[in-house]
Amino acid sequence: DAGVIQSPRHEVTEMGQEVTLRCKPISGHDYLFWYRQTMMRGLELLIYFNNNVPIDDSGMPEDRFSAKMPNASFSTLKIQPSEPRDSAVYFCASSVAQETQYFGPGTRLLVL
Amino acid sequence: TQLLEQSPQFLSIQEGENLTVYCNSSSVFSSLQWYRQEPGEGPVLLVTVVTGGEVKKLKRLTFQFGDARKDSSLHITAAQPGDTGLYLCAGALGYSTLTFGKGTMLLVSP
């Protein structure tokens, strides 16, 4: 199994630009989670889906952030417009029935 | 306020030494997980503890869940350079999602 796949692995962009992060969960997993990791705040849950439906987005910082899961094998996290304080590592994770979460390698985002 | 406090934040030791890291909270968790995260990678689950007072061993790693299910510890015996990484604890409140601590960064030097 290839595990959770995220792209891109690294993203450098300028303030105000749109950023789209992508995730392919492990086949057969029915939960998908988006996290953000920073030194200051640690690993924070942004949003999670069950069977492609968003369940809890209370962790999404503000309206500039949006996430979609159009099918069981693909999800996106979009930031528009991006700001320097959005710089962080963004992780996607998937699981079966909220059991063990398997994390992807992350996308390192730097907003200048 | 962080729901889960991990200590110490950083730990630098020599190969062969023993160490213990802690995960504390004022909340009662239905289960608690420990993850290790290596540089440039995502966290990987090491263990899940569910019962108060439970002790689990994974080779040289010993995990303990507090009797009141509010805290946990991870003890590593004879640490090796391959143990280097960020150790994260994460608690589950009922059937809700996980809440992560900020982690303990461990560096084991040869």
Image (tube, rainbow, N blue to C red):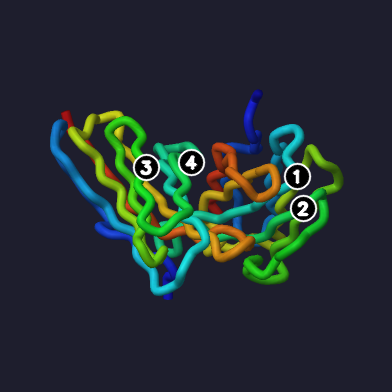
Label whose residue precedes the other's in the sequence (2 or 1)? 1
Which residue, as the protein is rendered here, is positioned at the far top? A1
Badges 2 and 1, same chain: yes
Image marks 2 and 1: residues in contact by CB distance under 8 Å? yes
Pick the quarter of the image with the N terminus of chain A. top right
Task: Report, in whole angstroms, how far the alpha carbon at label 3 lies from the one at label 4.
Answer: 14 Å
Badges 2 and 4, same chain: no
What residue would you read off at disc 1?
A: A30
Give the number of the mark in front: 1 or 3. 3
Task: Name the residue at 41% across, 51% down.
Answer: B88
Mark 4: few/some/many CA within 10 Å (<14, 14-19, 20+): some
Q: Residue B56: which disc?
A: 3
- SS under mark 4: strand
- SS under mark 3: strand
What residue would you read off at disc 4?
A: B45
Badges 4 and 1, same chain: no
Q: Amino acid at mark 3?
A: Lys
Task: Name the residue at 68% across, 56% down.
Answer: A17
Q: Residue A50: which disc?
A: 2
Give the number of the mark in front: 3 or 4. 3
Q: Is residue A82 above or below residue A108?
A: below
Task: Name the side, left or right, on which A96 lies relative to A52.
Answer: left
Q: Amino acid at mark 4?
A: Leu
Label whose residue precedes the other's in the sequence (3 or 4)? 4
Q: Position of residue B53 (x, y in %)?
A: 36, 56
Inspect this view and state whether residue B101 appears: yes
> Chain under label 2?
A
- SS under mark 1: loop
Image marks 4 and 1: residues in contact by CB distance under 8 Å? no
Q: Amino acid at mark 2?
A: Asn
Task: Report, in whole angstroms, how far the alpha carbon at label 2 lies from the one at label 4.
Answer: 21 Å
Q: Position of residue B48 (x, y in %)?
A: 47, 47
